[in-house]
Image (cartoon, rainbow, N blue to C red):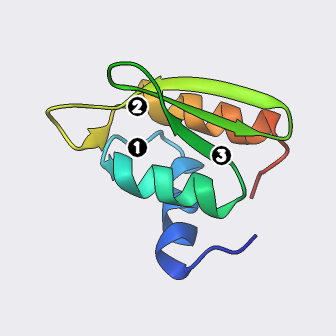
């Protein structure tokens, strides 16, 4: 994985327990791209991630910048299903 230190920190936060709710959405998108996933804007505030045949669609949080716990859990599940774990 070609992650820089900020992306690695975000990766660690996504897999941290208890699930965090203070991770900026833009940091999550950057980290997901760094592990090789495709990030695609969809209609409205939807964003899809695809990696290793696994596709997940999330709602980009707004007006707040941080991803809620449910979204962080979804990103963690997406990464695990795609074979990317700590």
Task: Give coordinates of residue 16: x percent, y percent.
Answer: 54, 51
Query: Which residue is at a point 46% across and 25% down the rendered structure image?
Result: 42
Task: Give coordinates of residue 74: x percent, y percent.
Answer: 57, 28
- Judged from the image, the secondary structure of the residue bearing numbered disc 2 is helix
Q: Which mark is residue 38?
A: 3
Report whether 85 appears left or right of 16: right
Task: Give coordinates of residue 29: x percent, y percent.
Answer: 48, 50
Q: Which mark is residue 20?
A: 1
Residue, far left: 63
Query: Which residue is at a point 53% across and 80% down the rendered structure image?
Result: 5
| Quadrant of image for the C terminus | bottom right
Q: Which mark is residue 77?
A: none
Residue 5 vs 23, above or below: the answer is below
Residue 77 vs 83, above or below: the answer is above
| Quadrant of image for the N terminus | bottom right
Mark 1, other Cα within 10 Å: few <14 / some 14–19 / many ≥20: some
Q: Decide which of 15, 58 is in the foreground and name it.
A: 58
- Judged from the image, the secondary structure of the residue bearing numbered disc 3 is strand
Q: Which mark is residue 69?
A: 2
């Amino acid at each position: 994985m070609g992650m820089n230190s900020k992306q690695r920190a975000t990766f660690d936060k996504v897999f941290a327990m208890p699930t965090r709710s203070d991770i900026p959405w833009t940091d999550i998108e950057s980290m997901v791209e760094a592990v090789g996933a495709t990030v695609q804007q969809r209609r409205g505030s939807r964003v899809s991630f695809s990696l290793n045949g696994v596709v997940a669609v999330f709602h980009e949080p707004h007006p707040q910048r941080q991803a809620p716990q449910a979204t962080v859990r979804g990103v963690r599940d997406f990464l695990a299903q795609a074979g990317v774990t700590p």
